Amino acid sequence: MKSYVLALLLPLNLGVDINQQGSPVCIKRDIADAIQSGARQVPVVAIIGPRQSGKSTLAKHIFKDHVYIDMQDSEIFNFANSDPKGFLETYKNEHGIIVDEAQYAPNLFPQIKVEADKNPQSGYFVLIGSQNFLTHEKISESLAGRVYFYTLLPFSIKELKSADMLLSSVDKQIFKGFYPRVYQPEMNAHEYYANYIVTYVERDIRTIRNIDDILIFKKFMQLCAVRVGAPLNITDLAMHCGISTSTAKSWLALLETSFIIFRLPSYHGNLGKRVTKSPKLYFYDVGLATTLMGLNHDIITKKRDVYGALFENMILVDFIKNYNARNLRPVLSYFRDSNQREVDLIVEQYGDIVPIEIKASATMDNRFFDTVIWLNESIKKDQRAIVVYGGAQLQKRTKGLVVPWNDVAYVIESLDKS
């Protein structure tokens, strides 16, 4: 069964997708096949990811016969938390139940465990959440061994490319970002992300944790954005925000839990002691990061250091999206040492280590291979060097593989075949 998902909904929820020219278009979410496969194996499937990334639309498409329940409805929420057994009995049916924003009803999870053990019907419970369930001890304990987790992020480059909706200009694509709603006609990406930030802070954050000064928290998010692609210095971040280090750590964890940011750890291996140990900070969407930076499109393209960091961020997240779609979880890291040698991404998969360089330049230079080749030699790996760059040509050079920015999926496919 082909899993073509109506991911861009009209304001009235008519279920019709449209591109920038107003023509119908169907966006295939590549992770759909993996979710369908998992739903045939375990009683509980969890689809998690940032708000407005298309989780509910995807779940409704895959599980058409399931009953859909939204925990943002106050009456539903009160019922589920006060009487979870009665709640599940009320909505019991032969196909299954979709519970949207399920993290709001933690009392429901122990009862889901009971019901799943009593009647382990594959794919019966479909749980959707804009917060990571795995960070909630009560939820993770209840679901252990009974659930498969899938993370749905905003559109991947491959998904947009397949729908003929990927922008030809790299810089415009970075500024537009990848959230589904920004691809509706007449949607201003900057305005969308500005409103997304307000909604996220005022609606979601307050439900997770009590933050006294929302303005300071917004400033914290902005400071995170200007540090995209840099090794994380929590003490420096806290000082510039005027908060304690412990508060900064807490807020970083909060942003990670709700899929706003992620940390890319450093690779150590056996490459000596002078290796940077701090993780790098990135956003799950570059459009959101550019809005938080407060920079317009022209300024971003002129500030080459900022542009390079955002390009790197975009490519790294696209690797994550493509691996999520394949239900693979390789270890991802970066390398930097005191001699300023740096490799932007290291993929550890199937017992192999693959270093990848990411360059925003639209023109390929053989020097881009230098650090990757050095790292391959250092870890005694005789393999092709890989560079993802801002140009448009796929090249198989003597030194290694050159991959254009819009074909990250090719790298992952080639690694799977090697």
Image (cartoon, rainbow, N blue to C red):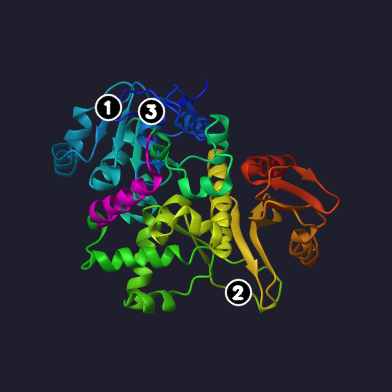
Identify which amino acid the numbered label 2 is placed on: Thr
Judged from the image, the secondary structure of the residue bearing numbered disc 1 is loop
Label 3, label 2: how far apart the Cα atoms are: 48 Å
Q: Nearer the viewer, mark 1 or mark 3?
A: 1
Task: Describe residue 331's horizontal placement relative to residue 57 as left or right.
Answer: right
Label 2, label 1: how far apart the Cα atoms are: 50 Å
Sequence order check: which comes first, mark 2 or mark 1?
A: 1
Q: Which residues are magenta?
A: 186-205
Sequence order check: which comes first, mark 1 or mark 3?
A: 1
When asked about the image quadrant of residue 42, the answer is top left
**Can you give x and y, in whole percent of width and height, for residue 24 in the image?**
44, 21
When asked about the image quadrant of residue 374, the answer is bottom right
**Can you give x and y, in whole percent of width and height, for residue 298 in the image?**
50, 55
When asked about the image quadrant of residue 357, the answer is bottom right
Q: Is residue 16 above or below residue 152?
A: above
**What residue would you read off at disc 2?**
276
Identify which amino acid the numbered label 3 is placed on: Gln
